[in-house]
Amino acid sequence: MAYIWNFHFLIQLGPLLLAGLVNTIKLWAVALSCGLAIGLVMGIFRTAPSAILRGIGAVYVESIRNTPGLVLLIWFFYALPILTGVQSSAWLAAVVSLSLYTGAYSAEIYRAGIASIEVGQWEAARALGFGYGNQMRYVVLPQALMRMIPAFGNRAIELAKATTLASTIAFGELLYTAKTIAEDQMRPLETYTVVTLIFTAILLPVSYACVWLERRVANSNGGTPRE
Amino acid sequence: MSEVLRLEGLTKSYGRTTVLKGIDLTVHRGETVCLIGASGSGKSTLLRCVNFLGYPTGGRVYLEGKLVGQEVADRSGAKTMRYRESELCAVRTHVGMVFQQFNLFPHMTVEENVMIAPIKIRGLSREDARKRAELHLQRVGIPEKAKAYPGQLSGGQQQRVAIARALAMEPAIMLFDEATSALDPELVGEVLLAMRKLAQEGTTMLVVTHELGFAYNVAQRIVYLHEGTIHEEGTPEQVLVNPQKPRTQEFLRGVTTFRMPEPKLAPAEQSNRGEER
């Protein structure tokens, strides 16, 4: 018994799916920006001379990395209103949890990137009279960031996939929208096929860009950025 | 002759290992002093204590007559020095350092390498900093490489940029930590010539080196370090040609086991061989 595929209803419901996609992209962009910012601070903490800062960084990274992303999301969905006293939305819980999640993983990328810079670079800056912050700012971070770009690309792809977790708390991103459509039309196979294709279409180019960047950074020896 | 640097009873230990066992040394303005000695004799450690990349464990460092750090009494009442990083940052801006491994910033052009500290620390405008960079790159003989990246330069050129970078802060004293040890043999000469030029222009220099020919020709004073103490000190003639102490003699015998006659070379465009004194 052959299954008869029917995609017609999706043409009509296209705008609905599109709205879901827009929400997915919004969540992706906001959580990625916040995550990278949190990661920068925590990554610097993790490599700081102060043991207290290093401790704070370690506790943050280890506690988040050892919690499933889904658990984190659900926890924030229920805990935020109680902690803040403000009725929280699915959007806010999703942004906060995915930002913290991305922040922990990118903190490790920053940490590894900073640690990969030779001691001599720090010393040369120090010998010129730069304090710790400026050694980091002018000498170490710019070089480390170059080496981190491919890893951040992979992190972005992971996060894009992780946004689908927000469907469990009824945030209207792509997967959640698809689920409602699928149930409404009783056509799950067609609907989820389209969702799969959309994700692949978006993430495949990003993946290729990462590979390309990785090769470029490797060729430049992490050194000269321009010809 | 005014003094630029004075070390009094400088000591440095790592745990139970004492690397420097009380160094007294004065460097005067315009003077070039070469530190020689075997590996592990404490030459580099001494240099790193002068700009506080390593903190001395004991003793005092005076830079241009001013004591660095605050003297405090520890629990037993003995006097020790306490160093604050903010003060040391200011001290380091007056002490230029050239490293064995060059340590240029690979993400900046040559010019930017030389400009960054004068701009960010001395507060120079980009224009003034560029002029200053041009001047110092000229002094080390590579003004044409200003827009290149360090990765595009030979080791000798990189080291000369590193010298210009340190000079651009117009330090009271320049420290050279085995500046030619990481270079291919044929590139050593150009760096030593740049250093000799600075010495002749009256730059105050404290130089750790294995290039005894350079030490003999350029230094006013040679300090031979052995196991963390100054073992013998004097003019190049005294220390390198007529060493009095058996240790110094042994060291020089080891370094100069084989010798060859001066190669007969056609004169280069500009005479760049170190002439005998």
Image: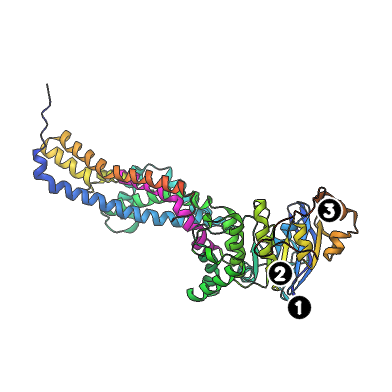
Q: How is the image coloured?
A: rainbow
CA gap between label 1 and label 3 equals 32 Å
Identify which residue, A182 or B134, lies in the foreground: B134
How many circles with numbers are drawn on the protein? Answer: 3
Q: Which chain carries label 1?
A: B
Residue extending farthest to the front is B266
Residue with the mark numbered 3: B252
Mark 2 and mark 3 lie on one chain; the one further toward the N terminus is 2
Identify the main secondary structure in magenta. helix
Query: Which segment is the magenta one?
Result: A132-161
User: For mark 2, does the 10 Å Cα neighbourhood hold few (<14), some (14 to 19), or many (20 or more) residues?
Assistant: many
Asked whether the beta carbons under mark 2 and mark 3 sit within 8 Å of each other, the answer is no
**Residue A161: x, y in percent?**
30, 43
Residue with the mark numbered 1: B2
Q: Which dot marks residue B199?
A: 2
Whether residue B11 appears in this view of the structure is no
Q: Mark 3 lies on which chain?
A: B
Q: Is residue B189 left or right of residue A216?
A: right
Q: In this view, does B148 lie to the left or right of A15?
A: right
Q: Which amino acid does label 3 sit on?
A: Leu
Asked whether the beta carbons under mark 1 and mark 3 sit within 8 Å of each other, the answer is no
Q: Which amino acid does label 1 sit on?
A: Ser
* Same-chain check, marks 2 and 3: yes
Whether residue B166 appears in this view of the structure is yes
CA gap between label 2 and label 3 equals 24 Å
Q: What residue type is labelled 2?
A: Ala
